[in-house]
Amino acid sequence: MKIQKRIAAVHDISCVGRCSLTVALPVLSAAGFDTSILPTAVLSTHTGGFDGFTYRDLTLDIEPIANHWKSLGLKFDAFYSGFLGSYDQIEIVSNLFESFRDSDTIILVDPVMADQGEMYSVYSKSMATGMKKLCEKADIIVPNLTEAAFLLEEEYIGNNYDKKYIEDMLVRLSNLGPDKVVLTGISYDDKSLGAVCYDKTTGSIDYAFNEKNPAIFHGTGDIFASSLLAGIMHNFSLAEAAQIAVDYTYECIKLTESMNQERRYGVCFEMAIPYLIKRLGLI
């Protein structure tokens, strides 16, 4: 019998509102992985649609947790980082990658720091520079267009892009260090939305699209990145894993709309987990 693969998810915890660890942990666990967590912060709710949320920074806890893991001789098949709340956290997580990685470790960085042309309120230019350095150590990065622009230190152009611009951007992002880049939130028309993938080792550029929904749903980026990693860890190609992730994210949105759920609480990804498990070939 094969040994179960272990993944370490380094994200914040929002106690209410499905995103970050409250998405990554159940999705990756349902996909069959021993998923360990390393919380970077605890929030009473996520920051989209809720006022007066509490925020507890856990920077001082990250290194002691990692040191304990190291003392236990723990090995991880993958690390998956998301929102990091300070420059110090970025530096600590970068050291964490170096401390635990070996030749077979997959490191996926979702550089959660901006959207719709704007950097998140807790981020600064120095933190964006730190995130760029973190991406240099990743095997896979999963930015949206705004984050890609910050990583490349160029102007965000909104929807004024074409296929050539996107494909050139993918190559330039890979030149930062990662072998694989998945650019999310890409659309060339009013009907489809998805992601574009670039694999530097093969030179291939692949598209993964599904039906476009104009509404904004919180936590879908975390759903996408978690299911993308699940596909890769189950030995699907980057293009195949991206299509699974796009389709699963769409299924989550479709179910949420059919159930008339309040959007600020995130999408009903739990109800669509059987779909993901089937797509991964586990049932």
Image: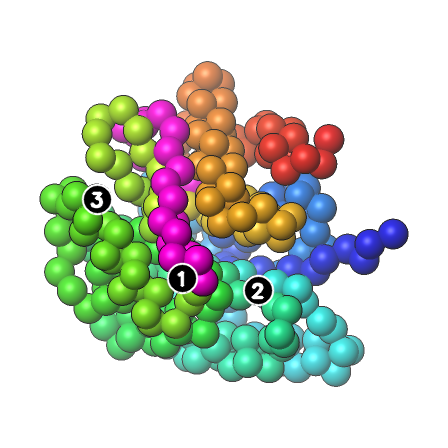
> Which percent across, then down, holds residue 51?
34, 46
Tell me the amino acid under the disc marked 2. Answer: Ile
Nearer-N-terminus badge (1/3): 3
For image coordinates 36% across by 40% down, the residue present is 207
Q: Quick one: 204 or 110, which is closer to the camera? A: 204
Nearer-N-terminus badge (1/2): 2
Mark 3 or mark 2: which is in front? 3
Q: Which element is circle 3 on? A: helix
Tell me the amino acid under the disc marked 1. Answer: Lys
Residue 163: image tag: 3
For image coordinates 46% across by 17% down, the residue present is 258
In the rendered image, the vertical position of residue 108 relative to residue 65, given as above or below = above
Decide: few, some or many residues near mark 2? Use Cα within 10 Å; few <14, some 14-19, many ≥20.
many
Q: Which element is circle 2 on? A: strand
Bounds of the magenta span?
Answer: 197-220
> Which percent across, then down, holds residue 98?
55, 80
For image coordinates 22% across by 60% down, the residue present is 149
Give the residue at the far right of this rendering.
1
In the rendered image, the vertical position of residue 33 relative to residue 100, given as above or below = above
| Image-based side of 249 in relation to 231, left or right | left
CB atoms at circles 1 and 3 under 8 Å apart? no
Residue receiving disc 2: 106
Mark 1 or mark 2: which is in front? 1
Q: Which element is circle 1 on? A: loop
Disc 3 and disc 2: Cα gap in Å? 29 Å
Decide: few, some or many residues near mark 3? Use Cα within 10 Å; few <14, some 14-19, many ≥20.
few
Q: Quick one: 16 or 102, which is closer to the camera? A: 102
The C terminus is located in which quarter? Answer: top right
CB atoms at circles 3 and 2 under 8 Å apart? no
Residue receiving disc 1: 200
> Which percent across, then down, holds residue 217?
37, 35
